Each structure stands twice: as C-alpha cells, then as structure tokens.
Image: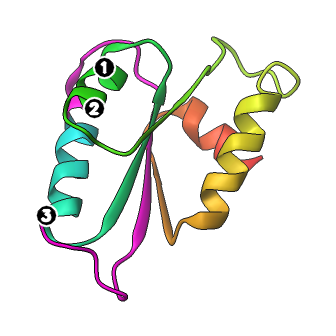
Amino acid sequence: MSDPTPESLRILIACSARKWIGEAAHCFQLYEKIAQIGHRPRLLVREGHELESRARDADMDVVALRYSSRFSPLGDWRDIRVMKHLIEEADLVHCHRGKDTWIAAL
C-alpha cells in the first residue's frame, strides 16, 4: 500500500448492504484499490453486518452507522449528523445504495 501524499484524496465510500453481496464486495475491493494508489479511503457501513466485520478484519478505516430500515429523517438523525461530519472531511463521496444517498443528501 502506498503512503498518502499531500495530493492524495480523502474518499468516503458508503455502502449500507446487510449481506455480503456483489455490491459489498465491490466496495471492499474499491477501498483496497484506492488505498493502493495512495489515496485515503474511509468505508461507511451498516453496523453489525458482514461488510463491517470483514473491513475491520482487514484493518480498513471503517465507520459504522445504524441505517434504519426505512427513510426516516428523525430516526436517522444520528446517522445524518455523523455522515455530515464525514462528508465535510472528504474530497469525494461515493454512495452505493438509496439509503446512503438520501442520508448524504440531507
């Protein structure tokens, strides 16, 4: 893995997948490739699910959100605040599911 340079990008990859499906595997591999070329990825995942455990086992920079089952601005308030802070730190945000996109948009 390359060391980040001052020109490296901080890239937030958001994936709220509950299961280890192609989308979750893609985000995992995307993180690895982004890190290999010297950027600084951070993976935003659904708390307590397989993507989180695999990413933590691989020593990735991981943040876990609750991601309620449906769209609920009040129920998602904690996640919205956390993602707002993470977006402010990022140069690029890459969302994979509708839930990720709605929370990021708020």
Magenta span: chief secondary structure: loop
**Local secondary structure at mark 3:** helix
Q: Amino acid at mark 1?
A: Ser
Among the two numbered marks 3 and 1 on one chain, the one whose residue lies closer to the N terminus: 3
Q: Residue at x 65, y 45 (%)?
A: 83
Q: Quadrant of the N terminus?
A: bottom left
Mark number, residue 36: 3
Left or right: 79 in relation to 55: right
Image marks 2 and 1: residues in contact by CB distance under 8 Å: yes
Q: Residue at x 29, y 42 (%)?
A: 60
In the rendered image, the residue lying farthest to the bottom is 7
Q: Amino acid at mark 3?
A: Gln
- Residue holding disc 1: 53
Q: Which residues are magenta?
A: 1-25
Circle 1 packing at 10 Å, graded few (<14), some (14-19), many (20+), is some
Up-down: is 84 above or below 24? below
**Local secondary structure at mark 1:** helix
**Local secondary structure at mark 2:** helix
Distance between mark 3 and mark 1 Cα atoms? 21 Å
Q: Image quarter for residue 58? A: top left
Q: Judge whether residue 6 is colored magenta.
A: yes
- Residue holding disc 2: 55
Q: Judge whether residue 7 is colored magenta.
A: yes
Q: Position of residue 53 (x, y in %)?
A: 30, 20
| Picture mark count | 3
Circle 2 packing at 10 Å, graded few (<14), some (14-19), many (20+), is some
Residue 48 seen in this snapshot: yes
